[in-house]
Amino acid sequence: MSQVKKPKFWRSLAERENTDEFRANAQREFFAKADEGPTVPGRRRFLQLMGAGLALSGCWQEDRLLPRTNRPEGLIPGKPVYFATTMELGGVGVGLLARSYDGRPIKLEGNPEHTSSVGGSTSIQQAAVLEMYDPDRSKGAARYSGGKRESGTWAEFEEAFLKKGADATLAILGDGSSSPTLADLKRRLTAKGVQWFDYAPINRDNERAGAKAAFGEVVRTQLKLDQTDVILTLDADLFGAHPNGLAHSKAFASRRSPEAGSMTRLYSIESSFSATGGAADHRLPLRSQLIKAVAAYLDSAVSPQVSAEGTAQGAPAAKFLSDEHAKKFLETVVKDLVEHRGRSVVVAGANQPAEVHALVHRLNSILGNVGKTVLYTAELEPERESYVAQLTKLVAAMNGGQVKSLLILGGNPAYDAPADVGFAAALAKVPTSVHASVYEDETSQLCSWHVPLAHWLEAWGDSLAWDGTVSLAQPLIAPLYDGRSAIELCGALLGEKLDALALIKRTHEERLAGDALWRRAIHDGYVQGSEAKLVTPTLKDVTVSLQGPDLGGVEAEQDLEVSFAADSKLYDGRYANLGWLQELPDLIGKLTWENAALIAPSTAKALGVTDGDVISLTVGGASLEIPVLQAPGQAKGSVRLALGYGRTAAGQIGGSKAHGVAPVGANTYTLRSSKLWDFGGGASVKKTGKWTKLATTQDKHSIDQLGGDEIQERIPVLIREATLAEYKKTPDFAKHKVHHPPLLSLWKPPVSYEGHRWGMTIDLNKCVGCGTCTVACQAENNIPTVGKERVLFGRELHWIRVDRYYKGDPENPGMAQQPLTCHQCENAPCEQVCPVGATMHSHEGLNDMTYNRCIGTRYCANNCPYKVRRFNYFNYHMDMKDDANKVKGMVYNPEVTVRFRGVMEKCTFCVQRIQNVKIDAKNHRRKIEDGEIKTACQQACPSDAIVFGDLNDPGAKVRELQNKERAYALLGQLNTHPRLLYLAKVTNPHPDLEQKQEGEGHGGHHG
Amino acid sequence: MSRFVFPRWANKTRDLAGIVLGGAPLYLIGAIWYGFSPKTTDVGYMPEQPVPYSHALHAGELGIDCRYCHNTVEKAAHAAIPPTATCMNCHARVRKTSAKLEPIRKSAETGDAVEWIKVHDLPDYVYFNHSAHVTRGVGCASCHGRIDKMPEVYQHEPLSMGWCLDCHRAPEQHLRPVSEVTNMAYEPEGGDQLAVGMRLRKENNINPPTDCSTCHR
């Protein structure tokens, strides 16, 4: 194999090394077992059902029509209505628009006017409707005593708890909400002596402490990425993990058009690949522990060049700085930052300690960025202690007997509290403990009471956006399971006569005096002009202490570091029961239904482990069994662990002891203690000898089936990339990557496309691979989840997937993302082989898929070069026969057929959205405006990478983009004439770090 | 022992068997063709409704416009069944004590819906849109028949895919001025539907698509 040239782009290590297994799979038309028939239910069962079906077909069921008794004016049955609302996560509210059919919210979109959404949304927000209709949600109050569960009622709970009121023996544990109303109620409760604590396992306490250290006051950083030329992130994921990630994605994307002549340059130094690192022009994988030394180095190098005030750090004697590549990298960063003073940004991740944040504040200040690209606003509750400290205090009070009753509002501390705090043990000492939550989870089972919390889509609420904008949430539906909101519970404790709506109105009565202002705010979902005022804190002297492990000495090299991060899908674990999120392939490993210990390939080799090996990871006295996944681009000697898995009381999807469902993934919270909170060294790995097959999707749907050499030749043709300098020289470089003889067709195109010609572009320069499009498509098009076993068979049903390619050296690769969906070929290979005419060409150029005609030959999928057709193997709605699961049906989009097993499914550019706009436009004899029809993926995309429209409309944006020089057709040499064109990726590397032309003999370092 | 010999007439059964066996497949095909066609199974379907509401009385004799009750027909996919309140607009005063109207009064009182039974029931994978047809000039009667003469509503047309396509391929057969859409007794100008239809088709640029995605999503 060594004689084979290593590819420039690759999707997995297996592909790069061209392993036997990979080649065996690539030879197959479908992934192993994907083309094998369903095993359950068997043929016999099928025949039985067929027989029963025939017998029953004579008498069909009458459909009933149940009109309202009194229809409000303007309400049209079957027509969707949109409402603005707000979803709060991690103490930040993001404005959303909910689409509701006949009182049934089924889809959420970003609110374009809201500053924290700007029209985009995250995969978690897309999946929120699934959570609301989850049949595993808590359905009523319950009492627990001695581990025995007994159903209770709200009336009993009121009698037993709420009526007793609030006094000093009551403690409340919140989950760090930014709700002004809850803050008001908290003030009233604490005035009565109630002890109030907050705890959230994913928080930004380090950032707050860093601001305190730098300025003496706690402030929040607001980044203006659209005005930034150079960005440096230090273990920070600006797009994915950051609470303001949607706004960041949009602002960053706005500066990534090579056509504009200049582009932002993004440097990323991080221990594990993030969306931001993937989008970076230069990335340096570095242990999280060493970031502090990097920050100190930057200060020491930048300060003299900008004649900064205050004391600069001395040059750290870090060992890694002697590495030639790292040194060059950092020198270039310094040069670039200094060159772009006032137009650069340095950001540190929430996991980095306060000192790093303080240094970053200093760097931004001396670089003159403050006031230009970096602004500050006041932070909420500036005086509050860190969440871990608060929880520790609460536990002490519980153990000391000062807490007679405890009310836990949301959260799941029994599962996600630091392992060394001993929350669960202390809980047993509280005479009356209550957990109000959406699910009856791990914490509920340890409390004496559980009461159902209303889902945020079912309740009135308010919260603050990242920039402080007051955002309002309105109920889209009456509580399905009799839940009440945290505001209602606190109000009841205070004996308030007002309901939640009135309490919220009271909180904002100054700001929203009068009905008109209130109605306006509810309509918009936020209060205009309510963003936090800018503050101008003064920088103090910052000093950091660098100790052994921070400097990466000899001993640190052998040392294994673990770092924790919120899962990009399950967050802190609260979304573990949402199949859409569990099945979404993650950014790095394309891993579904699991978490794994991410280890760099070289480290894995040194440890003697490989993908799927279950290791016993010991750190800080605790150990955990978890499978390994080699992650190219992971820092050497650093293990990344995603939090949020291994739930034992999440539900029938995420794991539930009560239902006999094994936990999904490993619970990494068992290793996380208050001392080892973000990351730390001293970990050791032991092989257990066990092995598990990880359900990754990365090698599947390998577009090319022609074998290893051909794949390696063709992948650079799939992802076309150039640097900005190259682009300026040859703007149409993408068109020259493939040369083929003139393409002739055997027959004339049957359609002339005189009306509409639907087309799409995906800008590879803007896509950061977040995966929101996949979940948005799933929500819009009623796509079922298939489960881990079938993902292993390659039977996942996502209509749009994001292919992630690595580039270059596995230890420090670049990354490229390519969302792939049906290309709606004008000369479509699928249409030509369907024996029953189930997939037909429309007059507008869509490859229509008619499910009721499909007989499931799968010839079309066979013939599709893009591998975007998905075969539905099972009746995934079977479980809805159970009455308890009927509620699942409420999430379906009534505009799209719910498919049965045995049919091929695929993207049709959201034809239901096209049709509805077309019909409406024609009813009113008007033209369809450009941008009026948005596909689900386009609407959800936070970075505007996807553009859809009518290619026959001269003013259409999609037409303008398709005519751009860097537009190219994927596999256009196959004469498919796709309607989906990609805009080639153009990176903006610094000339000093620019990679030499890709050649032989990789082994050295690369930037 | 005498052997059993088939009587001579038995020879004829051979021919008979030939005719029956040869004809059986043809008969079966014919029977299925006819028996399973929507023309046989669906046309004339007239379920018993909870209230024997007579369109013949309301739309025919009293001349109430279709859109008085089905008021979303020009705006939405569904020509919504009216809410109970619409019935009560008149029946709060008219025939206040009629036993047949008991379910309506009960519904108005309790707020529970009247459970009407769907007559025109398309398969779930078909997305028909009333507004798209009504605003182009396809009359109600074209698909629903003379509702104004039906004491109880029944399905007048097969509503099969072939039937839909017949019109989508040649809409002039059923086009009328938009103002005449709800006119049950509409007669084309000069009695020549095709001429009027062709003219309207041209004037209003009506080219109904026959793509799969026109109706199936």
Image (tube, coloured by chain):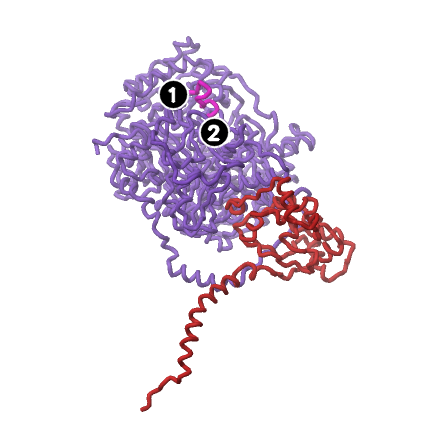
Chain colours: A purple, B red
Q: Is residue A502 left or right of residue A1007?
A: right
Q: How many marks?
A: 2
Q: Is residue A434 visible?
A: no
Q: Is residue A922 visible?
A: yes
The residue carrying mark 2 is A943
Vertical relation: A596 (above or below) A766? below
Element marked by disc 1: loop
Rendering coords of residue A168 (x, y %): 55, 36
For disc 1, the chain is: A
Q: Is residue A632 left or right of residue A493?
A: left
Vertical relation: A344 (above or below) A866? above
Residue at (37% x, 43% y) in the render: A863
Vertical relation: A371 (above or below) A621? above
Rendering coords of residue A555 (x, y %): 26, 25
Identified by mark 1, the residue type is Thr
Give the class, few, some or many, for how many residues have Cα within 10 Å of label 1's Cα (few <14, many ≥20).
some
Which of the two residues, A455 or A405, is positioned nearer the viewer here? A455
Vertical relation: B153 (above or below) A1001? below
Considering every residue shown, the one lying at the far bottom of the view is B1
The residue carrying mark 1 is A730
For disc 2, the chain is: A
**Sequence-wise first label, 2 or 1:** 1
Q: Which residues are magenta?
A: A253-264
Element marked by disc 2: loop
